Image: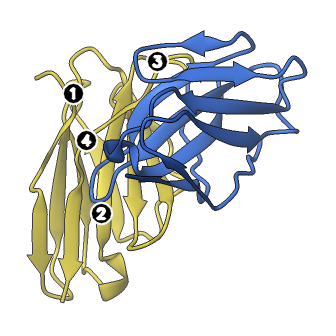
Amino acid sequence: GAGVSQSPSNKVTEKGKDVELRCDPISGHTALYWYRQRLGQGLEFLIYFQGNSAPDKSGLPSDRFSAERTGESVSTLTIQRTQQEDSAVYLCASNQQGGMYEQYFGPGTRLTVT
Amino acid sequence: DAKTTQPPSMDCAEGRAANLPCNHSTISGNEYVYWYRQIHSQGPQYIIHGLKNNETNEMASLIITEDRKSSTLILPHATLRDTAVYYCIVRRTGANSKLTFGKGITLSVRP
């Protein structure tokens, strides 16, 4: 596709359930990032992928959060045993490798934990 | 990554130029200045970036001072659709070039 896509666009889940969020980056972009944005707040970095490996997971808030990437393409962010504080918009972004290339964002997945 | 400082908000009249300032006094030589904006309920949108020279594209112009300690994003003819939160970000050139977002500046364009 022309841009970064994410699915689902909205997800409502009950506290304690597991959720999976998907990101399809722009074709050929080797760098992929996940961010989180809580209501009324700025974006928080979660994890960075270079190809299929994740050299920087420093932003993952707890061991309930994990992510993987396959085929240097699609990435999945998994949140286990969701809590109400996990409610946020989860944004994925990708760019060609290196900080001189602009990073493009997807529309995000709005997660609501009830 | 170097931190940036932006005023919390500003407004401008539709059709006039909007000049959004940013201070990044601790920027290092291998860091770019990036600008993104976020319109309500959407993902951030890339606007422009630069290293040390002024840059212009179809959306905006970026003016970086000679000492690189501050910059200004210029929207030459603001429209109501430019109302958004604008983020000035300093970003490393290395492989892990995550973006560190601050609070940004809320630009309100009035009719």
Q: Give the letter of the chain under mark 2.
A: A
Alpha-carbon distance for marks 3 and 1?
14 Å
Alpha-carbon distance for marks 1 and 4?
14 Å
Q: Which of marks 1 and 4 is nearer the N terminus?
A: 1
Q: Please name the residue shown 30% across and 85% down the image.
A: A83
Q: Which mark is residue A89?
A: 2
Q: Which of marks 4 and 3 is nearer the N terminus?
A: 3
Q: Give the letter of the chain under mark 4.
A: A
* Rendered colour, chain A: yellow
Q: Name the residue under label 4.
A: A106
Q: Residues within 10 Å of mark 2 (few under 14, many from 20)?
A: many
Amino acid type assigned to the residue bearing label 2 in the image: Val
Do marks 3 and 1 share a chain? yes
Amino acid type assigned to the residue bearing label 1 in the image: Ser
Q: Give the letter of the chain under mark 3.
A: A
Q: What element carries label 3?
A: loop
* Rendered colour, chain B: blue
